[in-house]
Amino acid sequence: MATSVTFTVDELPDCTVVHAAGDIDAGNRDELAEAITRGRRRGKPLILDFSAVTFLDSSGLHVLLNAHARAARGERDFHLAALHPRVARLFRITGVLHLLQVHAGVEQARTAAVTSGQHMVES
């Protein structure tokens, strides 16, 4: 039985925010990957708002780690915002929390994304 997830994209002047809602698992991980790809098309920092994601399995985590790896190669800055406690627990248990740029909320992620983007331009 496939679980339900929805993605909406807000294109802001300084970043793109993808809002996810629902459970992310093997049945819909491709939808997550596509939402990340759509969000990156603008060429601005990408923020994933996970405030309404109550479950994430290892396949969804794999998609996020791939997005992180692409960001590390310079494709676009990538931030996560507002993790549900169950999702944050998965990140801690698997030891990836320190790898990802995770913020308490979208505004904190937006500030970090804009600040890091300015540093990249200045370098």
Image: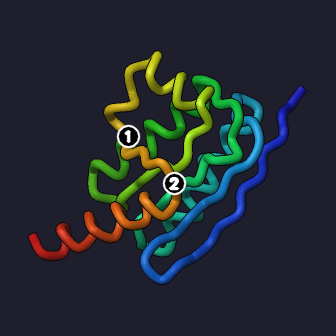
Number of disc labels:
2
Q: Which mark is residue 16?
A: none
Look at the image and tell me in which quarter the C terminus lies.
bottom left
Instruction: Please state which amino acid type lies under the numbered disc 1.
Output: Leu
List the single residue furthest toward the bottom: 13
Within 10 Å of the Cα at label 1, are there few (<14), some (14-19), or many (20+) other Cα atoms?
A: some
Q: Which mark is residue 105?
A: 2
Q: Which residue is mark 1?
A: 100
Residue under the point 53% across and 78% down: 12
Q: Secondary structure at mark 2?
A: loop
Give the distance between the C-alpha atoms of the residues marked 2 and 1, in whole angstroms. 14 Å
Q: Quadrant of residue 119?
A: bottom left
Within 10 Å of the Cα at label 2, are there few (<14), some (14-19), or many (20+) other Cα atoms?
A: some
The image position of residue 99, as x and y in percent, is 33, 35
The image position of residue 101, as x and y in percent, is 37, 46
List the single residue furthest toward the right: 1
Snapshot colouring: rainbow
Residue 70 vertical placement versus 25 (above, below): below
Residue 43 vertical placement versus 73 (above, below): below
- Relative to 18, 28 lies left or right: right
Q: Compare residues 44 and 97 and report the one nearer the observer.
A: 97
